[in-house]
Image (spheres, rainbow, N blue to C red):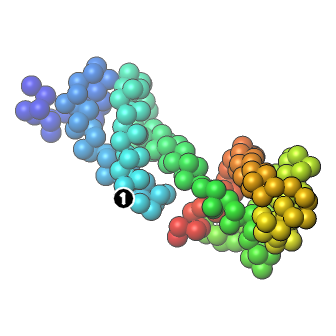
Amino acid sequence: MFLNQPEGYTEQELLEKVAGGNESAFKLLYEKYAGKVYTMGMNYLKSPFLAQDAVQEVFVKVWKNREQLTTLNSFPAWLTTISRNQLINDLQSLIPMESLEAISSEDSGHHQTTTGNEIDYRELEKAIKIGISTFSPRQQQIYLLSREKGLSHKQIASQLNISYDMVREHMSNALKNLRKFLENHYTHLLLLWLISRYN
């Protein structure tokens, strides 16, 4: 039986057993590499709970793609790739609307040349301006009154002679549109910004 002599198998033999659907072999593979994936998760997500969830998601992918295991040149390299992809997806899902509001309202005094995990705020501000240009005219008007003029929703409603709820709805949609635009075109900036905030 496999469990009686796990140490007697090379990694290639272990991968072959996993590829054949051997759950005991998969458990051994998990025990061997889960710690490394968890460490990557902590580096990216800064949360034990999120990191452990990422480990589970990664190994679900390993199991679902087990038939590929015997064709890999390097399992550790392949595992690193799918782990990184999973963690990037997890990071993207962590970008809340509150963070997006913080991004869009960063003071101009943050403009600086960056090193390490710091973000280039000038490039991010440029990306935000491009995103704003894709808004409807009314969304642009309300967004800029809020962000550039510093008006409250109530003040904007009074100035434009529209309801408070309409202002709030336009701002909510504007932030959602901006987030979608940045995720589609400037994901690296969002990730760098998020990483810099969690360090």
Percent coordinates x, y for residue 96 in the rendering: 60, 55
What residue does disc 1 label? 48
> For this rendering, which residue is in front, 80 or 49?
49
- Residue shown at 88% from the left, 46% from the top: 136
- Residue shown at 35% from the left, 50% from the top: 52
Percent coordinates x, y for residue 16 in the rendering: 29, 25
Q: Amino acid at mark 1?
A: Pro
- Left or right of 130 in this view: 178: left
Residue 161 image-quadrant placement: bottom right
Can residue 199 be spotted in the picture?
yes
Can residue 147 be spotted in the picture?
no
Residue 68 image-quadrant placement: top left
- Left or right of 15 in this view: 103: right
Disc 1 residue crowd, few under 14, some 14–19, many 20+, Cα 10 Å: few
Count of numbered marks: 1
- Left or right of 150 in this view: 25: left
- Residue shown at 67% from the left, 59% from the top: 100
Quarter of the image where the N terminus is located: top left
Percent coordinates x, y for residue 194 in the rendering: 60, 61
Asked which secondary structure carries label 1, the reply is: helix
> For this rendering, which residue is in front, 124 or 70?
124
Percent coordinates x, y for residue 53 in the rendering: 38, 47
